[in-house]
Amino acid sequence: MSHTLRGHRVGLLNWYDHPISTSPLEGTNNKIGLLQRRAYGYRRYDHFKLRLLTLHHTKFTLAG
């Protein structure tokens, strides 16, 4: 385990200087996959395309 940590030391320490994460991208990919599974029965591709485009324009806020 110590060899693994030593090998990734530079990348791990760089995260504190530049906290960049791929989490938003992975979340978007997950939503697209879910939309594809739900869109299996769509008759027209245009409807799926519109749903995909609205996925990127929606904003969610906390209520309450």
Image (spheres, rainbow, N blue to C red):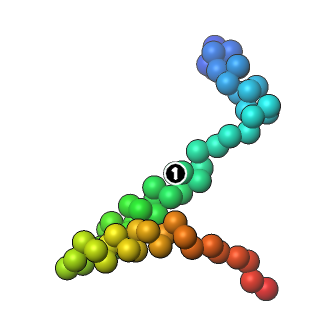
Q: Is mark 1 on a helix, strand or loop?
A: helix
Location of the N terminus by quadrant is top right
Query: Residue 62: horizontal and vertical position, in percent?
Result: 73, 77
Residue occupying the point 24% across, 72% down: 45
Residue occupying the point 68% across, 40% down: 20
Considering depth in this image, is 35 or 49 the residue closer to the camera? 49
Residue occupying the point 46% across, 58% down: 30
Residue occupying the point 38% across, 74% down: 50
Amino acid bearing label 1: Glu
Query: Residue 44: horizontal and vertical position, in percent?
Result: 22, 77
- Few, some or many residues within 10 Å of mark 1 (<14, 14–19, 20+): few
Q: How many labels does the image show?
A: 1
Q: Is residue 49 above or below residue 30?
A: below
Residue 2 shows in this picture: no
Query: Residue 10: horizontal and vertical position, in percent?
Result: 70, 19
Which residue is the site of mark 1?
A: 26
Considering depth in this image, is 63 or 46 the residue closer to the camera? 46
Considering depth in this image, is 64 or 7 the residue closer to the camera? 64
Q: In this view, does 25 lie above or below 61?
A: above
Location of the C terminus by quadrant is bottom right
Residue 62 shows in this picture: yes
